[in-house]
Image (spheres, rainbow, N blue to C red):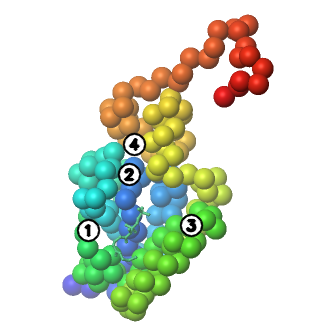
Amino acid sequence: MPHRSREGRGTRSLAVFPGSFDPITNGHLDIIGRGLSVFDQVTIAILVNPEKHPLFTVEERVAIIRETFRGEGRVQVDTFSGLLVDYAERVGASVIVRGLRAISDFEFEFQMALMNRKLNPRIETVFMMPAESYSYLSSRLVKEVFQLGGRVRDLVPPVVERRLREKYGDCAPPKPPPRGRRAPRGRRA
Ligand code: PNS
């Protein structure tokens, strides 16, 4: 049954926000928030890719995202394999949302958007820019920083930090060298 939109105009607009989300970051949350300001519903679609070796299993990523958006009825989480446009068509979404952090993202995203349009011209890709404060943020860097003892509190939702701790244990930051002992000149790493 078609749902009425937020403004009472026609059917509800549904956007798919696809990705690996290994793990979801505050940058993703920013894009989802922006998506919700334009579309009635956003479905976070996790790609099931047996060739990748993610840190979190698909089930863990689904659980993390569910916990992050508990109580937010306009955000769903789902998984997909195969072509993204086929998945979008199947769930009745006419829009794919992708985040663009920097020019460096553009080439790959542009290529993917055009390929998706070639495969299914009925599905439109919409790019959204996160807040500048997230322009450097990526799932890969979050994992690396955490593993090396860095602080990720402002970069991911609390459930992700907790799950990272469960995976890696508490990654204590490396101890600084004893006071007074300086690395020999010219050999600073
Ligand atoms: O978070 P990511 O890894 O940047 O997300 C990439 C993703 C999942 C959006 C992309 O790999 C994808 O859509 N894969 C599905 C396969 C597909 O449809 N390929 C053809 C279009 S380029």
Question: What is the distance, in whole Å, between disc 3 and disc 1 at their CAs?
Answer: 23 Å
Q: Earlier in the sequence, mark 3 or mark 2?
A: 2
Label 4 sits on what residue type? Val
Q: Residues within 10 Å of mark 1 (few under 14, many from 20)?
A: some
Where is residue 87? Give x, y as percent.
Answer: 27, 77
Give me the disc on residue 80: 1
Q: Is residue 63 visible?
A: no
Disc 3 + disc 1, Cβ < 8 Å: no
Where is residue 163? Give x, y as percent.
Answer: 35, 38
Q: Is residue 173 visible?
A: yes
Front position among marks 4 and 3: 3
Q: From the viewer's perspective, tell me whether residue 28 is left or right of residue 81.
A: right
Ligand 1 image position (quadrant)? bottom left
Between residue 50 and residue 43, name the one nearer to us: 50
Residue at numbered disc 4:
160
Q: Earlier in the sequence, mark 3 or mark 1?
A: 1
Quadrant of the image containing the N terminus:
bottom left
Front position among marks 1 and 4: 1
Label 1 sits on what residue type? Phe
Disc 1 + disc 4, Cβ < 8 Å: no
Q: Residues within 10 Å of mark 2 (few under 14, many from 20)?
A: many
Residue at numbered disc 3:
105
Compared with 180, 151 (above or below) is: below
Q: Earlier in the sequence, mark 4 or mark 3?
A: 3
